[in-house]
Image: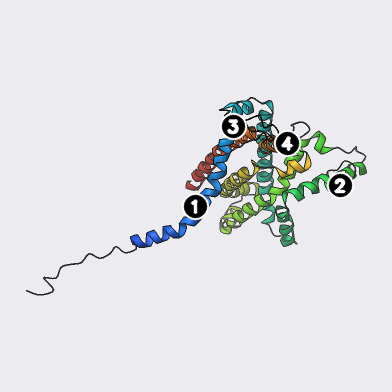
Amino acid sequence: MDQAAGRIPVAAAPVGRPSRARRTGGALLLSPAVILLLVWSLVPLAMTLWYSVRRYNLVDPTQVGFAGLGNYWYLLTDPDFLTALLNTAILVGGVLVITVGLGTLLAVLFDQSFPGRGIARVLVISPFFVMPTVSALLWKNLMLHPIYGVYSAMMRAVGLTPVDWLSRYPLATLVMIVSWEWLPFAILILLTAIQSLDAEQKEAARMDGAGPLAQFRYIILPHLSRAITVVIMIETIFLLAVFAEISVTTAGGPGVASTNLAFLIYSRALLQFDVGGASAGGVVAIVIANIVAAFLLRAVARNLEA
């Protein structure tokens, strides 16, 4: 019998599939990073959950023991919580309207060719690289100061009475400051998206008689829909945790007129020393942020699929 015919076939190893030893080695190499990430994220979360059901006040050692849902009930029935929640929604919504609306218009403008366009692009993007604390101090002491501010000098120059913006319109002023910080980010993302638009498509629309407004409505805006969704998602996640601007300019006042959820948690923990109540507020903030993030991620996924 032919040796080749009687040879027992040997199953070939599947191509492209790593062996068990390689998979085990890869898991061992990744395990330190995974463990560090879990410790970094789960330990603070577990401690927050633990303290949220405990009576714990830094200046009153007699407040000890299990509180159950008492901290949550006190927080949710506190009028300051509803005010902070409303202020957070107004702050996030106002900044999104300004940055997305004005950012879209400026992105279309900076996509056009004009003298000094490169310098203008650098200048309009530069505020994004200023630290939030520094920008808040800049607006508070240089721009909006009722006596020495630039806006006060401009109002006196035309015969108007200067306005103490941070006292009379604290939340609107914060919306303006935070919008100034995040507008360059929106412009950068939207300008990049506009530059990816096919020039031949715009040229064909122009040859068909479409004016600038028609091109903006039927070509540019549909093309920017995905980029606008991404800008809204990223900005919303960060705007829910705005703190430095409030702490530097208004300290949440007058009263709680400019207090958002993040500053309310800070005031409970480090101004009133109520660790249990602040931890309950942190858990509520985490739940709200995850709900908003899940909704935004689903909206982005639907937009990308379309």
Residue 289: image location, x then y, percent: 58, 39
Residue 72: image location, x then y, percent: 59, 29
Q: Which residue is mark 3?
A: 54
**Amino acid type of disc 1?**
Ile
What is the CA distance from the residue labelled 2 to the residue labelled 1?
52 Å
- Judge depth for marks 3 and 1 and give the one in front: 3
For numbered disc 3, what is the local secondary structure?
A: loop
Residue 107: image location, x then y, percent: 67, 52
Q: Which residue is mark 2?
A: 150
> Which residue corresponds to the image point at 92% horizontal and 44% vertical from the top-left?
157
Relative horizontal placement of residue 264, taking residue 201 as reference (left or right): right
Task: Decide which of tag 3 and tag 4 comes sooner along the chain.
Answer: 3
For numbered disc 4, what is the local secondary structure?
A: helix
What is the CA distance from the residue labelled 1 to the residue labelled 4?
34 Å
Checking the image for residue 35, the label placed there is 1
Mark 2: give few (<14), some (14-19) or many (20+) Cα within 10 Å: some
**Amino acid type of disc 2?**
Val
What is the CA distance from the residue labelled 3 to the residue labelled 4?
18 Å
What is the CA distance from the residue labelled 3 to the residue labelled 1?
28 Å
Task: Decide which of tag 2 and tag 3 comes sooner along the chain.
Answer: 3
**Amino acid type of disc 3?**
Arg
> From the image, which quarter does the N terminus lie in?
bottom left
Q: Which residue is mark 4?
A: 271
